[in-house]
Image (cartoon, grey):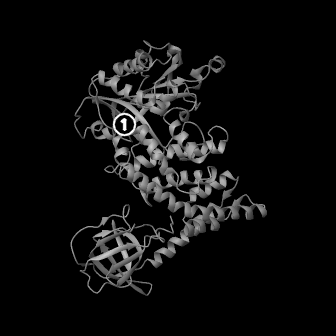
Amino acid sequence: MLTAKEIRESFKEFFRSKGHHIVPSAPMVVKDDPTLMFTNAGMNQFKDIILGNKAAKYQRVADSQKCLRVSGKHNDLEEVGMDTYHHTMFEMLGNWSFGDYFKKEAIDWAWEYLVDVLGLSPDRLYATVFEGSPEDGLSRDDEAAGYWEKHLPVSHIINGNKHDNFWEMGDTGPCGPCSEIHIDLRSEEERAKVDGASLVNHDDPLVIEIWNLVFMQYNRKADGSLEALPAKVIDTGMGFERLCMALQGKRSNYDTDVFTPLIDTISRLSGKKYGEDRQVDVAMRVIADHVRTISFSIADSQLPGNAKAGYVIRRILRRAVRYAYTFLDQKQAFMYKLVNTLIDLMGEAYPEIAAQRELIMKVIKEEEDAFLRTLDKGISILDEAIKVARKEGKNEISGKDAFVLYDTYGFPLDLTELILKENGMALDKVEFDKEMDAQKTRARNAAAVEATDWVVVSEGETEFVGYDSTSAPTRILRYRNVKQKGKEFYQIVLSVTPFYAEMGGQVGDSGWLVNGDDKIEIYDTKRENGQAVHLVKRLPADVTAELEAVIDAKARRATECN
C-alpha cells in the first residue's frame, strides 16, 4: 500500500516524465490579491497567466498545492469533523498546460496515472462531460467524450450540467467545459444493488469526485457572449486526501495516513481512544484537521488576529480548543504539542513548516492559553443560561445573554451557537443583533478623541520581540497628547517592544517603562494604523533617554474580547 508521501511524489514524478516543470506550492495565505484571503484552488497562483496578464515561464507545470476553503461560498467549517470527508485545509494535485497540449493528452494521462501507475480498478471509475448549453450556443463536449470512450464504456460517461461541468473564473474571462473523474468506493454488495452511475454528483460519501480536468477554451465577454481563446489552457485539480482514501482502501479520509499519525498523537496525549465514542471521534477529527490549517497559516506569515484572514485563523483555532476542552478534557494548552507530528508528516513536501517550527508552536500555545481562560468562564455562564431557559420551558437563550458572553468575556458568537446546537437549543439572534447595534452606537460616541500632532523624537519603526522576550531596552520614537471623555493621557511608539498590541477593543499587554528608579505604567497597548501604540499617563522626564520596557507577565492578555 502506497503511503501518502509516496502518492504525492508519484504524481509529481509522473508529470515530470511528461515534460512538466514541478513548481512549489504557493502560500496558503494570499497577500497580493484583494479578491482572495486564502488560496482555495491550485490555479490561484497561475491566474495572471490564465488571464493573459503574464507570460508563462513554462508551458507545462505540475504541483501539490496547499489550499484552504473556509470562507465565502466554499465554507464547510461547520461540517468539518462531523463527517469523514470535509476539511478546512486540503492538498490539490494539479497539472497545467498554457497553450500546449489540450483535451486528448489531459484525459489520456489522467487515465494512465490512475489506472496504469496507481492501479485503480477501471470498472470503479466514471467520467462526466459537459452536456451543452443552448443559451450559450454550446453543444455537448463530444470531443472529450470521444477521448473517454477509448478508456471507459459509454455507460460510465455521464453528461453533466453547466453547474457541474462548465468552469468559469468569474462573470467575465477565461472559461470552458470540464470533465470530472469519479470513483465508486462502495463494497461489491453495495455496487450490485445500486448502479454507481446513478450516484455520481449526488453527494454519496463513497461515490466521489477525485479529479477535475478543466478545458479553458473560451473567453466570456462583458455582454455574456463567448469567443474562442487564442491559447487554450488545461487546469486540473485532484483531491489528495480523497486519492489516498481510494488507494489505501479506506472509507474515511481520516483513516488514511494523512491523518492517522495526528489522531494517534491526540489519542496518546488525551488518553482517549478513537473509534469508541462519537463525540470524542468528532473532536479528534476537528483537531487533526484544524492544527494543519493553523500551522500552515502561521508558517505563511498569517498570525491569528481579529480582522480578515487573522480572524478566520483565530476562529478555527478556538473551535479546535473548545473541542479539546469539552470532549477530550484538555484544560491546558494541547494542540501545540501536535506540531512535531505534523512536521514529520508534511515537512518534507512543505519545508516552510519545519523552518517555522518554534514560531508555530509558540503562537499556538499562546493562543490556546489565552482562550482557555475565556473558555472556562464562558462555558460556565452559557451552561447556566441553558439551565434557566429550560426551566422556563424555552428552547432558546436570550440575545442579551449571548451578547454579554461575546462583549464582556470574548466568547465567539459562532461557538455559542455551536454549543447551543449540541444541546438542542437556539439563540435569539434578533435580540443579539439589537444589542450589537446599540454597542456600536455607544462605541462611536465614546470614540471621539482629541489628539495633538505626533512629536517625532527619533525616526524608525517598531521591532516586536514579544514572542521571545518579556522585556527589552528601547527608546521613544514618537508621542502625542490625547484627550478622551475628559481624561488626558499620552500615546507613545517605541523602537523595540515586547508588548502585544490587540485590536478591535481588546485589552492589550500592560507593564512598565523603567528608567532607573522611575517607573511609568503602560496600562494598555493598541494597534493603530499598523503600529503598536502604548498608553501612559505621563512621559519620562527625558523622552530621549534609553528605557526598559517590561511586560506585567501575570496580567498579559488576561482579558480577550472579539
Q: Is residue 152 left or right of residue 22?
A: right
Residue 34 % position (x, y): 34, 51
In this rendering, the count of numbered labels is 1
Q: Position of residue 243 (x, y in %)?
A: 47, 28
- Residues 121 and 340: in front is 340
Above/below status of 402 relative to 491: above
Residue found at x 45% / y 46%: 339
* Front one among 271 and 295: 271
The answer to whether any part of residue 135 appears in the image is no
Residue 10 placement, left or right of 393: left
User: Is residue 304 in sight in this rendering?
Assistant: yes
For residue 236, what is the image quadrant? top left
Q: Which residue is nearer to you in this view: 218 or 540?
A: 540
Query: How packed is label 1: few (under 14 Cα within 10 Å), some, or many (20 or more)?
Result: few
Residue type, label 1:
Glu
Q: Residue at x 60, y 62 (%)?
A: 376
The secondary element bearing badge 1 is classed as loop
Q: Residue at x 48, y 74 (%)?
A: 443
Residue at the disc numbered 1: 348
Where is residue 557? Give x, y as percent. 47, 67
Question: Above or below — where is 426 with respect to 476?
Answer: above
Residue 107 point in image, percent of width and height: 39, 20
